[in-house]
Image (tube, rainbow, N blue to C red):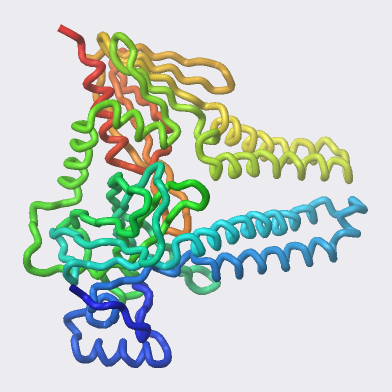
Amino acid sequence: MPGEPKNSDRLPAILTFQFGKRGARWRAQKARFPDEPWRWREDWESGVIPASKEGGPAGAWVLAVLFLAVGCGVTFLAWGELMSGKEPMLWFVTIFPFIGVCSLLRALVVTARAVKYGRPVLRLESTPCVLGGQLQGAIEFRNRRLPSAESAELELQERHVVVKKTRDGSRSETRVVWSLRVPIEVHGGENTVPVSLPIPSNGRQIDVDSPNMINWRVCLRVATPGADANVAFDLPVFAGEGGDPEQTKKRIESAREQDVLEAGEDALIDDLRQEGVRLKRYPAGLELHVRPLGLRRWGFAVTALVFAAIPVVFWFLALRKNPSIWRWLGFTPLAALGALIGSLTLTKSFRVRAGGKGLRITRHILGMPSVWQVPYEAIESVQPNSTMSASSAEGTVRYYDLDIKWQARGKSRKVCLGLGITDKAMAGALAQALRHASKPKL
């Protein structure tokens, strides 16, 4: 059994150097074991990995204080000009205090989470983790006890840090290029969560020396009363002996979809309900109800409202200062674009009935319906597709929709259901369930 982690080296997976004693040990271990990078970090070598500090309370408070100080200071200095109405574009600075308040609320949540759960550790059964093998271990909360969980899941991520050159230098972006989400059971009163996940053989091993770095991470999310648990651990994943070359990403995803289907429709209905998508049975088959994305994902709703509000606000402020037909016409396209984005995000919904002899698809936009009756023989494919992504503290998160393609009067038609769910396996299982339910009954 690996020992307890020491405090001499807890380097983040994406860094290749540190100053002081930790940097000295990193360089010494790198020179001694150039072909065994998992020995460079002491926690990787021991197999006891503390939770990542990325997205922790310190960074959240620094960001909140910075936005509040800058936003409130600039707004205070510009208050006279704002009230005079001479420069309507100056109202744009009020967005910084708004961001500061949102950052302050996030800092409070992150702090409450840190106080409630502490800093858990991941204890690996063996190190390093091999491509094509199994991630085996346990997450220990030490002297903390987990409360009763409403739901819980583990997610294994392959993350690429891409460095892009810009006119002002360069910037880095973390992308989650592959992930596997598995629901688990967490019982109240326990302080240990077992971890067992397959690692694909066609993934890429850890690379911390190149500018475009690669790292692996396992995340635990537990929904509990009050602050939820959300912790992540950087993993030492490398190519080595003992891995199964047949354990590819596609095969793992197919096995996960099969697990969802074998768990039954009731389990799929419950999983989709947690994502804000309603699936239910009716006498002839299944009925899927997808509410507008902006009513299920508050981040998309805020973005849509901002897109819709900013052009309209600037439009009226500019017209107050200089009411001319040309200024009115100049702001009209921006306001129309904002209204279009807002209406699609906040009002577009779908209802799909799969049963009898095919699919009946109903789409509502601003209350106006469009209906397609698709016979089973005309269906070409029902499959998940990633059309959206969003940046978060965990990297770039992909959202999966459902594409339905069919033939109508010699032409190929397609409708994209705006599911906006983050589990590809769940979207794939839903596609299979709808396709199966649409088959004619003998």
**Quarter containing the N terminus:** bottom left
* 22 left or right of 345 in image: left
Count of numbered marks = 0
Which residue extends farthest top?
Answer: 442
Residue 314 percent location from the top left of the image? 76, 45
Give the image quarter of residue 406. Answer: top left
Q: Please, is residue 417 above or below residue 316 in the view?
A: above
Q: Please, is residue 224 above or below residue 282 in the view?
A: below
Q: Which of the two residues, 4 or 390, is positioned nearer the viewer here?
A: 4
Q: Which of the two residues, 176 or 114, is positioned nearer the viewer here?
A: 114
Residue located at (19% from left, 57% from top): 199
Q: Which of the two residues, 1 or 217, is positioned nearer the viewer here?
A: 1
Residue 290 percent location from the top left of the image? 44, 27
Q: Please, is residue 285 above or below residue 265 in the view?
A: above
**Quarter containing the C terminus:** top left
* 169 left or right of 310 in image: left
Residue located at (36% from left, 20% from top): 280
Residue 113 percent location from the top left of the image? 50, 59
